Image: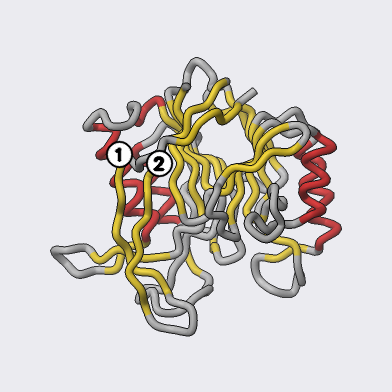
Amino acid sequence: MIELVELDAAPVATLPYLNAARGGGTERRLLHVERARVRGLPADLDAVIATSDLQGIVIEPRTRASILLGVAVADLLAELAFDGALPAADHTGVVLAGDLYSVPAANKRGGFGDVAPVWAAFADSFAWVAGVAGNHDDVTMLPRAGHVHLLDTDVVDCGGLRIGGVGLIAGNPDKRGRRDEADQLERIEVIATSDVELLLLHEGPAGDDDDAQPGHPLIREVIERARVPLTVCGHVHWDAPLARHAGGQIVNVDSRVLVLIPA
């Protein structure tokens, strides 16, 4: 069973990027790469990278081309692993909790587009990638390879870690990226009760404080009943990424990168 025991106080690295500002326009922000100490990682894994909601761009300095933030993150993490600041990439897995798209100018929130370049960038460098689609993600062009796993009411074994995932969010199914709430909750319950060690969602449960850690209260009820050891999610931002429930923990990785390493 994976248990997060400590978050490092200082980030390993920071990455400047452009993000769509509320009300329109673009703002500059910093993405932090942080380490979290955990117990219970399988012997074949030195680390697991968890991230979501990388809805921004980085400007390539030579060509001035707009690169999806997730592609730049994958490249940075591979460099950190090569330099020894993070565990070796070929013994590190990646879990993606959705919403990896940004409009090319990062001047409009939302949008819907192809996130295959982000998945491919992680798949090129790391042992495996497992993830779910967010409500802004077009996943039809995702790379199809043995170590790439798009989960939607599926369970997969990755490096000895049993991961289940359900994508999208609860809402009007006539809108992209949404599924009828009853259907979504039923799917989550099916996976949560499948002896998974890590449950991967885009829209996750409420945390310890409904105001500071917002989420779906009925999803919280499902994972508590099932006593899911670790739920990784995004969709809404929590300043404090960790919450606990009766049977396990919730880690929200919206707009952050957490590298889970042995305690």
* Secondary structure state at the residue bearing disc 2: strand
* Secondary structure state at the residue bearing disc 1: helix
Report the residue marked by disc 2: 34
Q: What is the x, y in percent for residue 207?
A: 69, 49
Q: What is the x, y in percent for residue 175?
A: 69, 74
- 210 sits left or right of 189 in the view: left
**Vertical relation: 6 (above or below) 64:** above
Nearer to us: label 1 or label 2 = 2
Q: Please name the residue shown 42% across and 74% down the image.
A: 20
How many other residues sit within 10 Å of disc 1, few (<14), some (14-19) or many (≥20)?
A: many
Q: Please name the residue shown 65% across and 65% down the image.
A: 177
Q: Please name the residue shown 71% across and 52% down the image.
A: 206
- 42 sits left or right of 194 in the view: left
Report the residue marked by disc 1: 78
- 17 sits left or right of 250 in the view: left
Q: For the residues labelled 1 and 2, say whether their Cβ atoms are less than 8 Å apart.
A: no
Looking at the rendered image, the quarter that the N terminus falls into is top right
Q: What is the x, y in percent for residue 23?
A: 48, 84
Q: Nearer the viewer, residue 46 or 254?
A: 254
Residue at the top extreme, as displayed: 43
Q: Please name the residue shown 36% across and 77% down the image.
A: 26
Q: What is the x, y in percent for residue 186?
A: 84, 49
Colouring of the image: secondary structure
Q: Nearer the viewer, residue 139 or 132?
A: 132
Occupied quadrant, residue 244: top right
How many other residues sit within 10 Å of disc 2, few (<14), some (14-19) or many (≥20)?
A: some
3D distance between C-alphas at marks 1 and 2: 15 Å
Q: Nearer the viewer, residue 32 or 137?
A: 32
Residue 262 image label:
none
Question: Callout 2, which amino acid?
Answer: Glu
Occupied quadrant, residue 27: bottom left
